[in-house]
Image: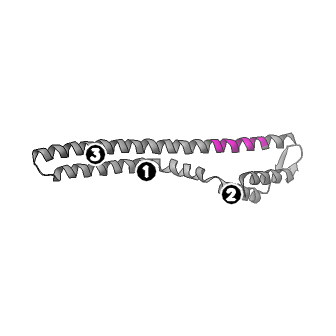
């Protein structure tokens, strides 16, 4: 079932519920409403679930990027230490190691920035989707109040 269908089902349930005189309130079958809400959660887009996962695991993502950077730097340092002590080879090795370190640091920075941007875009989409849902619910409530 799609989100809009579930919202319609919820609205129908509210419209068909027994009203309490004078108070403007209604009696709703709790189990039916909870089932609709559960179905609604299951229908939420995968992006919302991914955004929540990213939000919950952002530190792990950033830590993994830092660990990858550390591994690359460590491998570059090991490579330098294992090289022959010949002057020309040592100079070339040092230059190459510095390039590798600079590249690793640049890659780590790009990974961190990319993961932050990706998480932000997913969270922005989630915020927009939730805003749309809240607006729809607000409109439905307002319609109910008019009845």
Characterize the magenta stretch by its predominant secondary structure: helix
Magenta stretch: give its range: 128-139
Q: Which residue is mark 2?
A: 38
CA distance for labels 3 and 1: 24 Å
Q: Which residue is mark 3?
A: 100
Return the x and y of residue 39 as percentages of the image width and height. 70, 58
Return the x and y of residue 57 as percentages of the image width and height. 48, 50
Look at the image and tell me whether residue 27 can be seen. Answer: no
Q: Earlier in the sequence, mark 3 or mark 2?
A: 2
Q: Nearer the viewer, residue 42 or 26?
A: 42
Q: Give the label, 2 or 1, closer to the camera.
A: 1
Disc 1 element? helix
CA distance for labels 3 and 2: 51 Å
Q: Is residue 63 left or right of residue 9?
A: left
The structure residue drawn at horizontal position 38% and vertical position 41%, both measured from the top left corner, is: 109
Return the x and y of residue 132 as percentages of the image width and height. 69, 42
Return the x and y of residue 46 as percentages of the image width and height. 60, 54
For residue 131: magenta?
A: yes
Q: Give the label, 3 or 2, closer to the camera.
A: 3
């Amino acid at each position: 079932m799609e989100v809009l269908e579930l919202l319609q089902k919820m609205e129908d349930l509210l419209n068909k519920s027994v009203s309490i005189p004078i108070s403007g309130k209604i009696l709703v079958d709790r189990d039916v409403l909870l089932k609709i809400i559960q179905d609604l959660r299951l229908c939420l887009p995968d992006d919302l679930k991914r955004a929540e996962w990213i939000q919950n695991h952002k530190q792990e993502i950033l830590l993994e990027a830092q660990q990858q950077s550390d591994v690359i730097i460590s491998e570059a340092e090991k490579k330098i230490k294992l090289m022959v002590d010949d002057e020309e080879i040592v100079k070339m090795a040092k230059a190459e190691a510095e390039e590798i370190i600079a590249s690793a640091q640049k890659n780590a920075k790009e990974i961190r920035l990319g993961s932050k941007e990706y998480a932000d875009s997913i969270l922005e989409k989630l915020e927009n989707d939730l805003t749309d849902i809240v607006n729809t619910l607000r409109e439905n409530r307002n319609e109910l109040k008019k009845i």
